[in-house]
Image: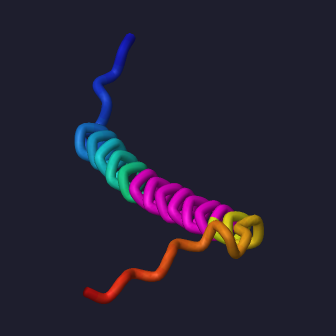
Amino acid sequence: MLQVPPSSHFIFIPVVLVLGIIIGFMLGARATRDAIATEERRRVDREARRAARAGKNASPNDAPAPAKAD
């Protein structure tokens, strides 16, 4: 015969579910912030490498002409 679960079941299970949702949300938010920061660092490094390459490959003839004073 089936027995009715104790009343603590009706409190414990929802509390564990809500706690799991909260912890998952916090860990997911932290992972997302870390991923965004990593992508930003990569973008800055990539732009710095491009600028260094462009500066290294530029010849003196490619420099813009000085502005004329009127």
* x then y, percent, for residue 10: 24, 38
Extreme top residue here?
A: 1
Q: Residue at x 44, y 51 (%)?
A: 28
Q: Which residue is drawn at 52% across and 72% down?
A: 64
Q: Does the magenta stretch include residue 44?
A: yes
Q: Residue 70, located in which quarter of the rendered image?
A: bottom left
* x then y, percent, for residue 41: 57, 67
Q: Residue 27 or 15: which is nearer the viewer?
A: 27
Q: Is residue 30 left or right of residue 62?
A: left
Give the dominant element type of the magenta stretch: helix, strand or loop.
Answer: helix
* x then y, percent, for residue 25: 36, 51
Q: Is residue 64 left or right of residue 24?
A: right
Q: Residue 50 or 54: which is nearer the viewer?
A: 54
Q: Does the magenta stretch include residue 43?
A: yes
Vertical comparison of 58 with 13: above or below: below
Which residues are the magenta region? 27-50
